Image: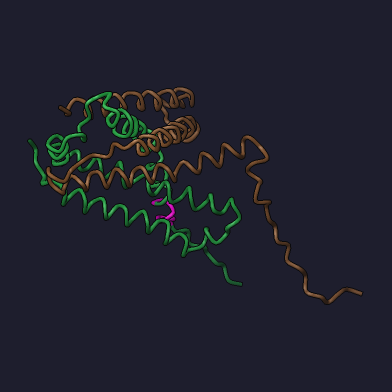
Chain colours: A brown, B green
């Protein structure tokens, strides 16, 4: 005789520490977490721009030791984001030249090249227009 | 017997958010590390002269419309990437509600708010100047 009881719903759950059990899981979470420090740094940058509107007498750029330490931490996360994100570009971007698929490795190499070139140009502007 | 023809509409909004996610990732990867290195570390430590360390050089470059457009893209677009990453990080940490429509409104709405604030800051901080 078949049971008439309502079926129980299976509730799938992961242990809270799943990401600490495997190096790859941990690095995945670190990659996703890069969003937090980078967002905070960009908000600071926006404040720095806004402060320029206060006039020459009130303007003083951020330069405290905690801020520099925070920037060093953010630079680590930013570089990790750049390397992991640009490394995937060969898998994501599909380019055909003369009906032939450009190799993924070449696209990844080009993206890292653009990163280096863009960094040089931005650095030249930030330093070149200073006094 | 009825023959039902299912209409396939292009998922325009889905396309839009994925586009913003990928572009935000690219912009953060390509441009952000050098800003953090120079404006967050080398400038405050006085290792190199940087444009934002003095009011006159900073306000002059902020008035350039191309710089304003660049800063808008640099600051605002990565927040759409961050919103997506943090939403799915919450899902991975056992918060399925982060997939819901209200969560999407909160996360992507925050990115839209950052975009609007950035536009406001860039338009009100330094008058547009080609000099």
At x 21% / y 28%, what residue is drawn?
A: A125
At x 58% / y 59%, what residue is drawn?
A: B96
Query: Residue B47: x, y in percent?
Result: 28, 23
Q: Quadrant of residue A56?
A: top left
Quadrant occupied by the N terminus of chain A:
bottom right
Q: How many marks overall?
A: 0
Which span is picked out in magenta?
Answer: B10-16
Left or right: A120 with respect to A9?
A: left
Left or right: B86 with respect to A121?
A: right
Q: Nearer the viewer, residue B35 or B25?
A: B35
Q: Main secondary structure of the magenta part?
A: helix
Q: Nearer the viewer, residue B80 or B86?
A: B86
In this view, the residue farthest toward the bottom is A4
In this view, the residue farthest toward the front is A65
- Position of residue B124 relative to residue A5, above or below, is above
Q: Quadrant of residue B64?
A: top left
Query: Residue B78: x, y in percent?
Result: 37, 44
- Position of residue A125 relative to residue B124, above or below, is above
At x 36% / y 27%, what residue is drawn?
A: A115
Is residue B107 within the magenta segment?
A: no
In this view, the residue farthest toward the left is B131
Query: Residue A90: x, y in percent?
Result: 47, 30
Q: Quadrant of residue B33?
A: top left
Quadrant occupied by the C terminus of chain A:
top left
At x 46% / y 27%, what residue is drawn?
A: A101
Query: Residue B17: x, y in percent?
Result: 41, 51
């Amino acid at each position: 005789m078949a049971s008439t009881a309502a079926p129980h719903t299976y509730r799938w759950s992961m242990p809270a520490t799943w990401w600490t059990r495997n190096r790859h899981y941990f690095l995945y979470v670190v990659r996703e977490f890069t969003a937090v420090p980078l967002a905070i740094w960009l908000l600071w940058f926006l404040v720095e721009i806004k402060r320029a509107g206060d006039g020459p007498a009130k303007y003083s750029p951020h330069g405290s030791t905690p801020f520099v330490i925070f920037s060093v931490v953010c630079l680590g996360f930013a570089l990790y984001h750049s390397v992991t994100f640009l490394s995937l570009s060969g898998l994501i971007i599909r380019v055909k030249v003369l009906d032939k698929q450009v190799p993924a490795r070449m696209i990844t190499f080009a993206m890292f090249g653009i990163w280096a070139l863009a960094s040089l140009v931005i650095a030249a502007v930030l330093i070149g227009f200073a006094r | 017997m009825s023959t039902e023809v299912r209409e396939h509409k292009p998922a325009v909004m889905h396309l839009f958010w994925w586009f913003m996610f990928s572009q935000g990732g690219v912009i953060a990867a390509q441009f952000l590390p050098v800003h953090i290195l120079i404006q967050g570390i080398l400038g405050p430590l006085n290792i190199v002269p940087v444009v934002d360390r003095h009011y006159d050089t900073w306000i002059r470059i902020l008035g350039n419309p191309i710089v304003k457009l660049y800063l808008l893209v640099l600051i605002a677009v990565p927040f759409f990437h961050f919103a997506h990453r943090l939403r799915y990080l919450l899902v991975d940490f056992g918060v399925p509600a982060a997939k819901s429509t209200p969560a999407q409104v909160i996360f992507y709405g925050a990115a839209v708010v950052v975009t609007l604030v950035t536009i406001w800051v860039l338009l009100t901080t330094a008058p547009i100047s080609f000099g």
